[in-house]
Image (cartoon, rainbow, N blue to C red):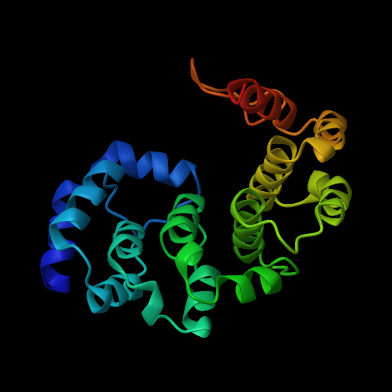
Amino acid sequence: MTLKETLAKLKSLGNDKMRMQNKKRGADDNQFGVKMGDIRTVANTIKADHQLAMDLWETGNVDARLLATLIIDPKQLSVKEMEEKVLSVNFVQLADWLNSNVVKVHPHNEELRVKWMQAKNHMCARAGWSLTAGRVTRNPDGLDLSALLDRIEKEMATAPSEVQWTMNTTLAQIGICFPEHRKRALAIGEKLGIYRDYPVSKGCTSPFAPIWINEMVRRQG
């Protein structure tokens, strides 16, 4: 599909309700309001197309950028290009799709993780903590978990909301995966109280770290 054809397809799938939902969550007016499932369907039709993904990203359109994260080839992105994309995002849903589908599998994600853990930009910091949470669960060798807990205890209460979410994920994963740090992770979660009253749908686990940690540990038996 060409860029023009792809944008036309996305536009045809847009709806006002989704546009309003996106705006409430921080998206700007450059969007069609396409449901996430429909974006995935379009991506499945296109498969991988790196150049189209780059062109879609350049439009600045939210839906086009979400689609781009599903069809881009992360290996073809330089470190500079990867960071520019993260810096250009101001919508959390897009940031998370970019992190999950592109940043997480970028060849230099560890180099970027280390840099972003000190970033002042909210989305870079969100991505850095997201990558760190992933390392806690999959490749913790070399991580100073006590130092991470120190930072979380000191910084999370006053961190921007975009960053709090992935800091909290890191806190929970440390508590879930490392019994020797569980008591402290639970204590930090209780002390900070972040997401204590977060609304969740029936059957879903609360993001409040003590509830999250205890539930995952219970499921592990």
Question: Is 4 displayed left or right of 196 in the figure?
Answer: left
Q: Residue shown at 62%/21% (left/top)?
A: 221
Among the 4 quarters of the image, the one containing residue 190: top right
Q: Residue shown at 27%/40% (left/top)?
A: 16
Among the 4 quarters of the image, the one containing residue 47: bottom left
Query: Percent from the top left, x then y, of residue 206?
Result: 61, 25
User: Is residue 220 positioned above or below 74 on the image?
Assistant: above
Query: Percent from the top left, x then y, of residue 3?
Result: 17, 72
Question: Is 163 displayed left or right of 94 in the figure?
Answer: right
Q: Nearer the viewer, residue 119 or 61?
A: 119
User: Is residue 136 positioned above or below 203 on the image?
Assistant: below
Q: Residue shown at 73%/43% (left/top)?
A: 174
Question: Is 95 displayed left or right of 156 in the figure?
Answer: left
Q: Nearer the viewer, residue 118 or 22?
A: 118
> Quadrant location of the N terminus?
bottom left
Among the 4 quarters of the image, the one containing residue 194: top right
Query: What is the tally of numbered marks visible in this picture?
Result: 0
User: Is residue 89 positioned above or below 138 on the image?
Assistant: below
User: Is residue 45 positioned above or below 174 on the image?
Assistant: below
Query: Percent from the top left, x then y, of residue 173?
Result: 67, 42
Q: Nearer the viewer, residue 22 or 179?
A: 179
Query: Percent from the top left, x then y, of residue 133?
Result: 64, 51
